[in-house]
Image (cartoon, coloured by chain):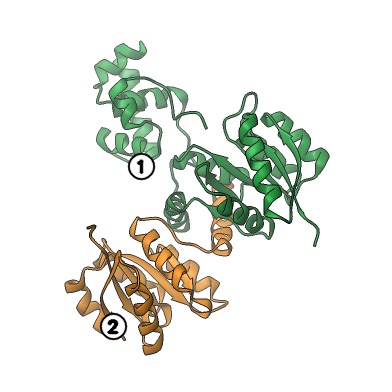
Amino acid sequence: MSPIRVLIADDHRLFRQGLRHVCQAAGGIEVVGEAEDGWEAVRLAQQLKPDVILMDIQMPGQDGVEATRLITANDPPVRVIILTMYRQDQYVFEAIKAGARGYLLKDIDERELVEAIRAVHRGDALINPGLAARLLEEFRRLSRGETTGETERLTDGEMQVLRLVAQGADNKTVAERLALSERTVSNRLSEIYRKLHVNSRTQAALVALRRGWVTLEENQNHNGHEGHKG
Amino acid sequence: MTIPIIVAILAHDDILRRRVRTWLEGASDIAVVGEAGNKQEALEELHSWHPRVLLADLDTLGDSEEVAHLLACFPETRLIVLHGEAEESRVLEALQWGALGHLAKGNLQPEEVVKAVRSVARSEAFLSPTVAGWIVEEVARRLRAP
């Protein structure tokens, strides 16, 4: 049987080397190339025609989700496994929507990674078990025909308001912090409620926390960064 | 000493039930609180058993509505369904109605049953790569729909 041809896309050289080593030691898997960013991943995918791509999310230039979208749109048989530090639902759903067949966290062991490469190569999927539970919830919601926050995205402006609301800020404070009128804040909040299918600021804050748009740590530090390096 | 994962088993097949029970009892972090051979018995006992995980044969449990009914009555309980080969649509339906894991009866392995119980007890899904593939495809399709 011919080996499974793998392309590695990650901006950290040491991590790429580690992945290469794991693949080569596994047997039946051949690493055909390495990309340092999303653009290179797209280019090498076209050029090398790998069977499976191991893709980081956060890379300079183009991110891994966008690269996945481009690659699977051009060449559907290429299977992409997202390998990331991000454990937020939002990224999982975006990645799956973009065409990824695997979503694993970088804390997996060698055996799991090799198993995942083989699984996606034969057309199956492997999702981190904790995130798979969220995926199941989404599957249930979508099966019932309900729309979700994932399908209707918040604008950047709405997201800024939601982050402050999740930190416990009232409308007046939000308005001051973002240099908006209270009326605008109130309008944005109504849009947020509508899109998230909630009817209170507490519920909206909970959705924001659950989906990883804000973290508890962020609440304490009042720093506006989203997630961490993946 | 940590609190063990409380597990109950529902299956009409005595051999299957006993086999699964023996395997689970071999794990020090799992305690089998009871077993039932039919659905009625299970529904009566579950109130006193309060299991964290219920392993239930789909054939014994009945249709998917039963899954939903059961889980609505016992929201703290995580359900793993046992199913036959080539029962994809039934498994998907059970997952859709609230099951968190599934195991094919045909090639049950002790380590796998124990792993499944531990996973769903932590509220993680336990899906075969094949079933995960269907779910990924279905979710991707629906998320892309306008």
Q: Nearer the viewer, residue B22 or A42?
A: B22
Identify whether B9 is placed above or below A18: below
Q: Position of residue B83 (x, y in %)?
A: 47, 77
Residue kind at label 1, given as amino acid type: His
Q: Residues within 10 Å of mark 2 (few under 14, many from 20)?
A: many
Residue B18 occupies quadrant:
bottom left
Chain B's colour is orange
Residue for badge 1: A197
Identify whether B56 is placed above or below A35: below
Contact? badges 2 and 1 (CB < 8 Å): no
Question: For numbered disc 2, what is the local secondary structure?
Answer: strand
The furthest residue to the left: B48
Chain A's colour is green
Q: Nearer the viewer, residue A197 or B43?
A: B43
Residue for badge 2: B36
Residue at 28 percent across and 80 percent down: it is: B35
Residue A165 occupies quadrant:
top left
